[in-house]
């Protein structure tokens, strides 16, 4: 059985940074031995009479959850953040009401996962999902599809590789959709198109596209090479707006797959004819070695709520700074408690890049002030 709870504004800061201490004890995997196994009543206490998402919560968020005794190796928790600009339902007078509340209940009833919601001062939506791994993954996919605005993109791979993306009985495709919270449409066998359509959030699309290209690379009859490059140096290899890696691919005829920022991988995959592939690898290695020697870093503290202004729409602000200064700006993941922004570049360029970062932050403060006045 499932329930919804609404986090208060006061507890949002703790929730945004991860989980409040009581929730951590409840929802995460427990590896310690217990003297007594929990009874059914302990593990599943009675629900409150009314679902908390349908009316203003009268008790602290997670009050029902605090009564649950952890069940070993069965429950996990993940926190997802939906920025204001990607929320489908923005015009509700009271958080937790309306169509959004109905969707929450439907997702929980369908998946068996437990959802807790909170609203930030910037009106972004934070959703904590607890349950068995399979339930959490299914709930995450539903959340993205029903509470977050969708984008779409296509990726072209050889037609003969499509079946490897689908996998036996469609299992590979289903797993990929769950992992990336996307919808992946593959042309029918009698359709000559080699374009695979991916629908989801920008981050989900990037992850799915990366995985599809990796599957294709594994099946490619041409040479394949993998190069380990520290994640922090990927922006220099891609170049502003991916123009540098695009030029290398065009000039060498080699496909180069760099993991997107949201994918925690360091491996860059090259696919192509042996001689041209070697040229592409050599050029990437040269860029990597030069940047390792010439660049240094500085760290600055920027409020978590202002990170999105440094990033910009679709990451455009980061690309602008990289293009104008040659400096890469590293932003902590949205689910991290860190407020430290790292600038990496040649020493003489760091000052200019830092000025641009502060300009983005200052502009955001003026915007918030104007909206509130």
Image (cartoon, rainbow, N blue to C red):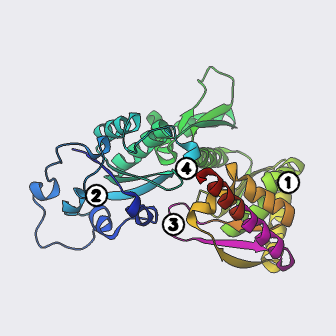
Of 155 and 315, the residue lying toward us: 315
Residue neighbourhood size for the residue with mark 2, other residues' Cα within 10 Å, grouped as few (<14), some (14–19), many (≥20):
some
Q: Which residue is mark 2?
A: 62
Judged left or right of residue 6, residue 268 is right
Tell me the distance, in whole angstroms, between the alpha carbons under discs 3 and 4.
Answer: 15 Å
Q: Residue at x 84, y 47 (%)?
A: 253
Q: Residue at x 83, y 58 (%)?
A: 280
Judged left or right of residue 169, residue 281 is right
Q: Which residue is mark 1?
A: 248
Q: Which residue is mark 3?
A: 336
Of 225 and 184, the residue lying toward us: 184
As drawn, the residue found furthest toward the right would be 251
Nearer the N terminus, badge 1 or badge 3? 1
Nearer the N terminus, badge 1 or badge 2? 2
Nearer the N terminus, badge 3 or badge 4? 4
Of 90 and 66, the residue lying toward us: 90
Question: Looking at the picture, how far across and down is residue 341, in whole percent?
Answer: 65, 71
Question: Looking at the picture, how far across and down is residue 234, in whole percent?
Answer: 72, 63
């Amino acid at each position: 059985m499932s329930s919804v709870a609404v986090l208060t504004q006061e507890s949002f800061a703790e929730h945004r940074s991860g989980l409040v201490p009581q929730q951590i004890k409840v929802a995460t995997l427990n590896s310690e031995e217990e003297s007594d196994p929990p009874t059914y009543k302990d593990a599943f206490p009675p629900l409150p009479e009314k679902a908390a998402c349908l009316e203003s919560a009268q008790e602290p968020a997670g009050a029902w959850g605090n009564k649950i005794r952890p069940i070993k190796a069965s429950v996990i928790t993940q926190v997802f953040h939906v920025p204001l600009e990607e929320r489908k339902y923005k015009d509700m007078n009271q958080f937790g009401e309306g169509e959004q509340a109905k969707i929450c209940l439907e997702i929980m009833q369908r998946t068996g996962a437990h959802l807790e919601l909170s609203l930030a001062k910037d009106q972004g939506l934070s959703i904590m999902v607890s349950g068995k791994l399979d339930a959490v993954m299914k709930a995450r996919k539903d959340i993205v599809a029903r509470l977050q605005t969708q984008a779409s993109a296509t990726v072209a791979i050889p037609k003969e590789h499509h079946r490897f993306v689908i996998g036996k009985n469609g299992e590979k495709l289903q797993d990929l959709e769950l992992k990336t919270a996307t919808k992946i449409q593959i042309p029918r066998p009698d359709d000559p198109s080699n374009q695979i359509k991916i629908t989801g959030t920008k981050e989900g699309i990037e992850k799915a596209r990366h995985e599809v290209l990796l599957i294709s690379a594994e099946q490619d009859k041409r040479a394949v090479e993998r190069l380990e490059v520290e994640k922090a140096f990927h922006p220099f290899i891609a170049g502003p707006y991916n123009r540098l890696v695009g030029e290398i691919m065009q000039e060498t005829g080699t496909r180069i797959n760099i993991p997107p920022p949201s994918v925690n991988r360091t491996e860059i995959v090259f696919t192509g004819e042996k001689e041209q592939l070697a040229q592409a690898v050599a050029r990437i290695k040269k860029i990597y070695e030069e940047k390792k020697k010439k660049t240094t870093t500085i760290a600055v503290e920027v409020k978590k709520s202002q990170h999105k202004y440094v990033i910009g729409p679709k990451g455009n602000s980061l690309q602008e700074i990289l293009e104008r200064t040659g400096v890469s700006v590293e932003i902590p993941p949205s689910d991290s408690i860190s407020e430290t922004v790292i600038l990496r570049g040649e020493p003489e360029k760091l000052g200019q890049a830092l000025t641009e970062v502060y300009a983005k932050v200052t502009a955001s403060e003026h915007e918030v002030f104007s909206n509130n006045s």
